[in-house]
Amino acid sequence: MTRAIAKVFSSVGDTFLGTAFAISQTQGLTAFHCIGKRKTGEVQQQEVRLKFADGRKLGARYGGGDYVADFALFIFLETLPDGLTPIPVAEDAFYCERFHSPGYPMGMAQVGMVTVTGDVAEPEAVFEGVPAIQLFCREEAAGLSLRGLSGAPVLVTAGQVEAAVGLVRWNPPRQDHPSGLLQGVLPRKTKGLDLCVPRSFVLLRRTPNDSVRPSGDVPLVYGAVRFHGFAARRNDKPRRHLGAVDLTARRGLPKRTRGGELRSGKPLADR
């Protein structure tokens, strides 16, 4: 089976826009700035073409998102082709854990899909008022331009399952290796990626050592409260509704804090 990670092209003109990945048989994610303007929220690409690593293609249309948090949902025009596997989504990232992010940086376009690696520097960061995960990326630190990797999944190990804890949203450019991406507030010596944290139909609940809870997919179908959105984490605040992907929460579902304690997980609508 092939992971459903694709190049994103405009439907007219065949312009390369970035990276996207499937989270179900009918939906996928990318960064909003790949298909629209972050300053205004204008969607410039209502429909796109996705090209997967095995050469197969799939049409998709914009299905919602948040231009401030910089994520966009794709609705596939057809069901995901056989042999392509959607990416499960994990609930938490942890300090210093390893990540890898497969995608299509322009600097290595001739070799196809490339994986960058690194470590989680801050799992509960807030950049420009938006919940984020800050990562240290070895390839970026070595000078590789990551332009084109926007929208790629950030993958970690959840038990024996590979799952996404976020998507690549922003790579602060360096003065010695300007990449032309969005300017940020991080100091020059800080080399990391800024991610929004998606949650989807299937959620993998994790512990720091992945030993307390059994590994495997945990369907988020606990109660009657349904949402259409992301949940994101801010420092010292509960997850909050952002808006874009189907999500179900349960009353009283414990949520793990940064220190590992459990707290009440009231429905997002009650927070």
Image (cartoon, helix red, strand yellow):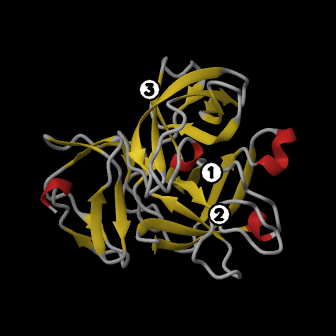
Query: Where residue 182 sits: x, y (%)?
Result: 62, 62
| C-alpha gap between disc 2 and disc 3 | 28 Å
Q: What residue is shown at x 50% (from left), y 66% (from top)?
A: 133
Name the residue carrying label 2.
171
Residue found 42% across the figure and 66% down from its top: 130
Q: CA distance from mark 1 to mark 2?
A: 8 Å
Quadrant position of the N terminus in the picture: top right
Badge 1 density bin: few <14, some 14–19, many ≥20, Cα 10 Å:
many
**Residue 37 image point, x, y percent:** 53, 49
Task: Say which quarter of the image contains residue 224.
Answer: top left
Residues under numbered marks 1 and 2 in contact, where contact means CB atoms less than 8 Å apart = yes
Q: Is residue 226 left or right of residue 140?
A: left
**Which numbered disc covers residue 254?**
none
In the picture provided, is 101 more to the left or to the right than 62? right
Provide the residue designation for mark 3: 26
Q: Locate the C terminus and report the quarter of the image it occupies.
A: bottom left
Nearer to us in this view, 51 or 138: 51
At label 3, which amino acid type do we have? Thr
Question: Which residue appears at 63% of the width and 68% of the height?
Answer: 183
Amino acid carrying mark 1 in the image: Ser
Camera-near label (1 vs 3) is: 1
Image coordinates of residue 89 in percent, x first then y, are 45, 47
Q: Is residue 105 left or right of residue 216?
A: right
- Helix, strand or loop for disc 3: loop
Q: Which mark is residue 150?
A: 1
Mark 1 or mark 3, earlier in chain: 3
Q: Earlier in the sequence, mark 2 or mark 3?
A: 3
Q: Amino acid at mark 2?
A: Asn
Disc 2 or disc 3, which is closer to the eye?
2
